[in-house]
Amino acid sequence: MPDDAPLTCPRCNVPLKEVRTSGGVFYACDGCGGRAVTIELLRNRFTPESINPLWLHAMRGEGRLGLPCPSCRQPMIGVALSDRAEINVDVCQHCHFIWFDTHEVDTLVPRQPEPAPVAPELPQKAREMLAMVEVERLSKQAEGSDLDSAPPEELWKQIAACFGLPVEFDEPEEQREPWTTWLLSAAIICASLVAFPHLREVVQRFGLIPAQATRLDGLTFVTSFFLHAGIIHLAGNIYFLLAFGHAVENFLRPLRYVVVIALAAIVGDLAHIALDPRSQTPCIGASGGIVGVITFYALNFPQMRLAFLMRWGFVWFHWIRLPAWFVFVLWILFQLIGTLEQKAGMSSVSSAAHLGGAAVGILAWLVWRKPNEESRLLK
């Protein structure tokens, strides 16, 4: 693993924070309170009687399949913490990392302290807390404040932000390429481009008309998903699918990912129909399904920060970062207002379909937010 690649929490799948102590370095997760510690650090801090049985069991492979290693991501071995403790920890035979869930390390027997120096030292826990605070301070200082931050390194993100689009400043770690997202995006683009030369006729035939929802045996629920009203409509939907779909696909895996998009699109269409069931205006676009993906992203990765470029006219101002959950709450408020405008005939954007897709995203997150760890390792 490259030296500059962050270690990842095997439970929360977020980057771990490096904490430097007088005895060495360990890595901590703010979410679950777990710690990744090297065997060398444990030997410096705890008695051999506490550590040797743990390492002996791991080297012999005497244990069950454990969590993924924070460094190499290979499955670790779950072994007994010691011969006397009824607690299992996860040990990587390759990287020599040991994963402790919160408070598990407290069961180890520390070495006898050295003779007290003339100047009393702070307790170990206090030093660790101070070290973590300092690491956090340096990290924030390097990034700049969230209200006046540095721009993203990728040029394409800077270009997207110039058009008012949010871009990921933090990105969840991924183990697989998002092939489903790429293929679905390609299919939407191809279908829309083919329809553009004869868009009016195609939309009238294959768009979803609320007053005729069952025409073509309900096929328009599918065909309308792949049609768009123009290049801007198409580019916007594809951007959000590519920008946020990759992380959701990686978390859910392709099958459940497609289920979320399909159900969000259908429920979004039903919400659009329910708002005005007698309407003869065709509805097209993939936004209902894509909103389901965006909602799952915001709920599953709430602390991931999204960067925005604040501007006034043609004068560029500051970059700001906002957590995904906060952006999602603001977006929901705008959609509620948009639905009232849609009901009053003041808007052609189907905010009701967006809210229907968001409802599916929320339900999917409630069902799949805590996947079985062992099943995830075996996939």
Image: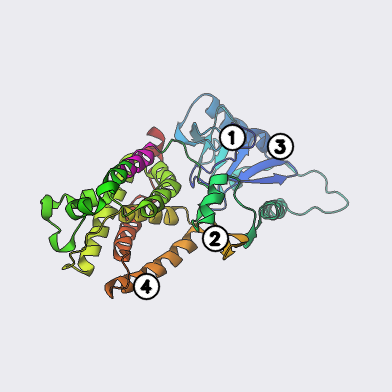
What is the CA distance from the residue labelled 1 to the residue labelled 2?
A: 33 Å
Residue type at the position of mark 2: Leu
In the picture of the structure, the residue carrying the numbered disc 3 is: 44
Q: Which residues are magenta?
A: 179-189
Look at 53% across and 54% down and name the residue there.
Answer: 161
- Compared to residue 379, the image places residue 278 above or below, namely below
Q: Please report contact status of discs 4 and 1: CB closer than 8 Å, yes or no.
A: no
In the picture of the structure, the residue carrying the numbered disc 2 is: 322
Q: Position of residue 84 (x, y in %)?
A: 54, 39
Q: In terms of secondary structure, what is the magenta stretch mainly?
A: helix
Q: Count neighbours of disc 2 (C-alpha within 10 A) and say few if under 14, some if 14 to 19, many if 20 or more.
A: some
Please identify the quarter of the rendering in which residue 296 is found.
bottom left
Q: Which residue is at the front of the view, 29 or 50?
A: 29
Q: Position of residue 123 (x, y in %)?
A: 73, 53
Going from N to C along the chain, the mark reached first, 1 or 3, is: 3
Q: Count neighbours of disc 3 (C-alpha within 10 A) and say few if under 14, some if 14 to 19, many if 20 or more.
A: few
Look at 42% across and 51% down and name the residue there.
Answer: 240
Look at 57% across and 37% down and name the residue there.
Answer: 98
The reply to whether the magenta stretch includes residue 184 is: yes
